[in-house]
């Protein structure tokens, strides 16, 4: 292989990597183990984990501990689904296409937009793909991102835009929400604006003001949304979003250490041909029977090559199937009931925690499932000490912004009972009280 590509040694392939970044020692890889030794080693490693039931967790930030019905795992484990990849000669796999079509339909209904694609890797890359799609629509060179968008999304956006001429501009926030006035002054014609709603702090953004500002200035709005929240909040289509994206993990996927995840992207019919990824459509055959076909695959490098909308996005087929099964099992009313449970329990949790002296909400404003609690103790210390008591109280907000190192992002789902929430509130209150008295 080296001879074929015109080099003498493998090291010649590394010339582009600075020497100080190259390892000069042998890798610390243990020798071969027997099956029994591997099994024992993996069991020892697994025993270090503290799963739900052992550790009461209120961590969220994009990946949430929702109930997943057993039927989701049962259906997605069926070999005809579990081993399948979205085929290139798609019509030979009607079951796979039908499940993707149903997923697309549900996402389109949730967002209020015309069409959704057959899924993407995760919410962060979906936002980045949407930004590139938006720039292609507007022919602009600027992407505006509020500081209230999740850091992971902003980092992925920055990476995506590195090889383009587009500029990434951060829009300031006020009290945990985007400064709509500053946004209106900043946005220009052809700009792409990404709004996360609810945002990285769990707060609901002023969507009507943002939508009006972007429309007035001739920009294009992308809404990054929590799909479950759309059961109780206005869909992106109602505040002027031309493209909507999000993370679909809450739709029947396990937390699983943060992956695999599921990104979705929906848009209007006007922009459908600029959408990355595959789109499955329904039709009838020559005998009038309903069938499913791959209507568009505009991303495909094997077809469009340099003209492809994306050369890296792909269909998370199994994850999209799980989401479709999950939403089908819940149904319209069950989906809304879950969202109402989440919102009401989050409100109860905020009230229970802030009832203790020394604990308060860092930001005013409405929230859906998450809220920021300010403590007199560094969040890293709170997390460390409460973990010993079997509680993960949330995420250290210092990871979102360094000035918030005494704040916790607390997330609640329908799986958290009143007793769970009361236990967290009591533990936080006792810690603050003890530190104050000492």
Image (cartoon, rainbow, N blue to C red):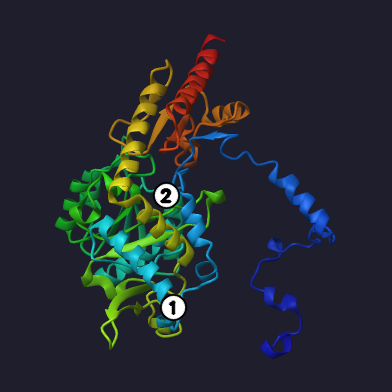
**Above-or-below relation of 108 to 292:** above
- Residue 90 appears at what percent x and percent y? 42, 80
Quadrant where the C terminus lies? Answer: top right
User: Vertically, is 437 above or below 394?
Assistant: above
Compared across the picture, whether 178 is left or right of 45 comes to left
Q: Quadrant of the N terminus?
A: bottom right
Q: Which residue is mark 2?
A: 250
Badge 2 marks a residue whose secondary structure is: loop
User: Observer-nearest residue: 164 or 338?
Assistant: 338
Disc 1 versus disc 2: distance between alpha carbons? 27 Å
Quadrant position of residue 180? top left
Q: Residue at x 45, y 75 (%)?
A: 311
The residue tagged 1 is 93
Q: Nearer the viewer, residue 135 or 116?
A: 116
Crowd around label 1: few <14 · some 14–19 · many ≥20 (10 Å): some
Residue at left offset 34%, top offset 74%: 280
Image x and y of residue 268, in percent: 23, 66
Can residue 348 be seen in this snapshot? yes
Q: Residue at x 42, y 15 (%)?
A: 357
Q: In the image shown, does 406 or 286 lie closer to the viewer?
A: 286
- The picture places residue 291, in percent across and down from the top left corner, at 32, 78
157, above or below 233, in the image: below
Furthest toward the left, the residue is: 216
Residue 60: mark:
none
């Amino acid at each position: 292989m080296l001879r074929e590509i015109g080099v003498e040694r493998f090291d010649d392939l590394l010339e582009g990597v600075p020497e100080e970044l190259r390892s000069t020692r042998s890798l610390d890889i243990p020798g071969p183990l027997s099956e029994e030794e591997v099994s024992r080693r993996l069991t020892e490693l697994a025993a270090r984990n503290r799963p739900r039931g052992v550790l009461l967790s209120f961590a969220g930030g994009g990946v949430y501990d929702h109930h997943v019905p057993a039927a989701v795992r049962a259906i997605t484990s069926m070999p005809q689904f579990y081993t399948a990849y979205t085929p290139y000669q798609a019509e030979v796999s009607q079951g796979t296409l039908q499940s993707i079509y149903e997923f697309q339909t549900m996402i389109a209904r949730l967002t209020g937009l015309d069409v959704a694609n057959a899924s993407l890797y995760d919410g962060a890359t979906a936002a980045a793909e949407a930004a590139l799609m938006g720039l292609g629509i507007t022919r602009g060179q600027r992407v505006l991102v509020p500081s209230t968008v999740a850091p992971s999304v902003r980092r992925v956006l920055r990476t995506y835009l590195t090889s383009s001429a587009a500029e990434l501009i951060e829009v300031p926030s006020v009290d945990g929400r985007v400064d709509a006035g500053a946004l209106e002054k900043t946005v220009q014609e052809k700009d792409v604006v990404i709004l996360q709603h609810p945002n990285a702090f769990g707060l609901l953004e002023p969507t009507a003001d943002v939508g009006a500002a972007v429309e007035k200035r001739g920009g294009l709005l992308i809404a990054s949304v929590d799909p479950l929240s759309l059961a109780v909040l206005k869909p992106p289509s109602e505040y002027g979003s031309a493209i909507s994206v999000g993370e679909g993990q809450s739709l029947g996927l396990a937390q699983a250490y943060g992956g695999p995840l599921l990104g979705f992207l929906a848009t209007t019919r006007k922009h459908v041909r600029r959408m990355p990824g595959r789109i499955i459509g329904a039709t009838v055959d020559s005998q009038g029977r309903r069938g499913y076909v791959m209507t568009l695959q505009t991303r495909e490098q094997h077809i469009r090559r340099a003209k492809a909308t994306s050369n890296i996005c792909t269909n998370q087929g199994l994850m999209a199937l799980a989401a479709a099964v999950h939403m089908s099992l819940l149904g319209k009313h069950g989906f809304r009931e879950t969202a109402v449970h989440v919102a009401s329990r989050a409100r109860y949790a905020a009230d229970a925690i802030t009832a203790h002296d020394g604990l308060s909400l860092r930001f005013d404003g409405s929230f859906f499932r998450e809220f920021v609690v300010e403590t007199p103790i560094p969040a890293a210390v709170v997390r460390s000490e409460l973990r010993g008591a079997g509680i993960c109280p949330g995420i250290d907000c210092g990871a979102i912004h360094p000035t918030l190192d005494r704040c916790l992002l607390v997330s609640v789902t329908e799986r958290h009972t009143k007793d769970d929430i009361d236990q967290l509130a009591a533990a936080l209150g006792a810690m603050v009280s003890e530190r104050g008295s000492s």
